[in-house]
Image (tube, rainbow, N blue to C red):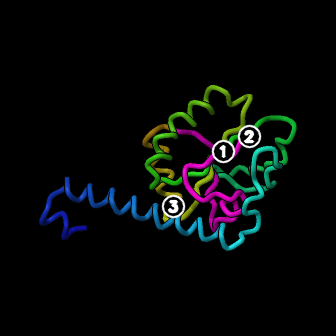
Amino acid sequence: MCFIKQFNGAIYEKRVLNNLQQLAGAVVLATLAENIQAGSPAAGDVGIGSQAPVFSARTLEGKVFNLADYKGNKPVYLKFWATWCSYCKAEMPHLNSIKERYGDDIQVVAINVAMNDSVANIDHFFQGQGYRIPTIFDTGGELTKRYGVVGTPSCIN
């Protein structure tokens, strides 16, 4: 990046970074699609009227989220996303608003697909925007595969 900055200035560097982020997103989406086509455990099993695969995971705040705890009690809104996904970033204010406004009636959980991303990126993004959405970092992509997610943003509710 220093080479680009030296010869073309910061504006060009920003464009290159944006293009690289989009390319990284395309590579991740292709990888997600390959996982589904390869017959990941629950590929295609999640749909309208079907039961969501039950899971338990620790949020970035250290709390245990167990989907089974909400069965019959409270609707759950799962948002699969990544910090490099511009559409995901555009949806986050809405997701945060749902959590703030309906948090007593709906459990909102953001699940970061953890491909080409990091907890540090999530923390930086959330702190910069003031978001307080419970977030799971899907290391290894187990939840992403189980829910048949092939692109971001994706939601399950």
Of badges 1 and 3, nearer the viewer stands 1
Q: Please report whichever mark, 2 or 3, sits nearer to the chain's N-terminal start.
A: 2
Q: Amino acid at mark 1?
A: Val
Please rate how many residues cluster around mark 2, counting C-alpha atoms within 10 Å: few if below 14, some from 14 to 19, many from 20.
Answer: some
Task: Point out the stretch of residues depicted in magenta.
Answer: 131-157
* Residue of label 3: 118
* Residue of label 1: 109
Image vertical order of residue 75 relative to residue 30, above or below: above
Task: Tell me the element at label 2.
Answer: strand
Disc 1 from disc 3: Cα separation? 17 Å
Task: Tell me the element at label 1.
Answer: strand
Disc 2 from disc 3: Cα separation? 24 Å
On the image, the x and y values in percent for residue 127 come to 47, 43
Is the Cβ of the residue at disc 1 closer than 8 Å to that at disc 2? yes
Disc 1 from disc 2: Cα separation? 8 Å
Image vertical order of residue 89 relative to residue 98, above or below: below
Q: Please report whichever mark, 1 or 3, sits nearer to the chain's N-terminal start.
A: 1
Task: Pick the residue in front: 53 or 50.
Answer: 50
